[in-house]
Amino acid sequence: MDTPVADAWQLLNWHVIDPKNIGDLLAAPSRYLTLAADQQAIDLRRLDPETRDQTQAELLFGDRPIVHVVGGGGLLFDRFQKAIQALVQQRQQSPDRNKLIAWGPGQQIYGKFTPQQIQNFDYRTYLDGFDLVGLRDAHVENLGLGYHWLPCASCLHPAFDQPRLIRHEFVVFSHKKFQIDFPDFPRMTNEETDFETVLNFLGSGETILTSSYHGAYWGTLLGRRVLAFPFTSKTHTLKHQPGIFPIERWRPAGWQLKLLGKTWIDRRRYDRFTCDVTGWQRFLKQCRTYPESLQETRDRNHWFYQRVLELTSVAPT
């Protein structure tokens, strides 16, 4: 077992705990590593200063020395900025009794974006004031900000070590809100909560067609080819790049009737989006395997774990 940080520290792992999104559920490093004798995972969404309940206020602003770990998941997004800044503020107010670590979060840009916008993403808006930063976005080590590349900690799950046979040429793994339509192939969404079931499904395909970030990530770690259908910038930041299908537009599922410039019937669903996948076969030539990816991502997480131990080896004053 890994050696825990100094016993005087409590550790809180802030991430999104969504029972209908297995990627978010499994992104927390505290699931796989003993980071402290007293550690727990808490939903970051409960830290918004405008909605925080008393229990969360006591956790954040209590008098105990705390190591706050933020990640993983796509947390560098407007929705989570206030919650992250609340942690930064607490770190600044009591620096000797609070440590702040980013473990594998990453950026998200929705809608249209360019490669330059991905490269120029303003990480400092979220991360200034952190003691140690590891991000799942592969290019961050080239920014000169002292950030480390740190892929999602879910690579540490032991279920990756099981061999799996290829049974299908293609399988489809969709994000629950952004679903790609391939009715002739086996399908699953990220609402499936049993991880071995997910990996068995992904591993059964020679090539994985996916709109899910973690579908692309896990498929790569399983040694499969991946063609991604992104709905944010996050898929473009993976170190082991899948093939990318260029989405023209994600549109609400359903239909509407418009006549003479007026909408008469609107049956569109804004909790689910679809896209045109015409011509997807042309992009299969981009897809490749990365046999080294599982060991590389695991090694990187264990390397970062040692940096955390160094940071927290001194008991708080």
Image: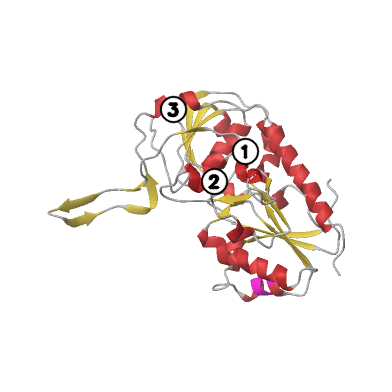
Question: Eyeballing the image, is 66 above or below 119?
Answer: below
Q: Which residues are magenta?
A: 56-60
Q: Which residue is mark 2?
A: 119
Residue 76 or 142: which is nearer the viewer? 142
Taking the spot 57% from the left edge, 33% from the top edge, the residue there is 219
Residue 6 or 163: which is nearer the viewer? 6
Question: Eyeballing the image, is 190 above or below 55?
Answer: above
Tell me the distance, in whole angstroms, between the alpha carbons under discs 1 and 3.
29 Å
Looking at the figure, which quarter contains the C terminus?
bottom right
Mark sitting earlier along the chain (1/3): 1
**Element assignment for label 2:** helix
**Element assignment for label 3:** helix
- Dot 2 crowding, Cα within 10 Å, few <14, some 14–19, many 20+: some
Characterize the magenta stretch by its predominant secondary structure. helix
* Type of amino acid at the residue the image marks with label 2: Gln
* Type of amino acid at the residue the image marks with label 1: Glu
Tell me the distance, in whole angstroms, between the alpha carbons under discs 2 and 3.
23 Å
Q: Is residue 191 visible?
A: no
Q: How many marks can you see?
A: 3
Q: Which residue is mark 3?
A: 283
Mark sitting earlier along the chain (2/3): 2
Disc marking residue 196: 1
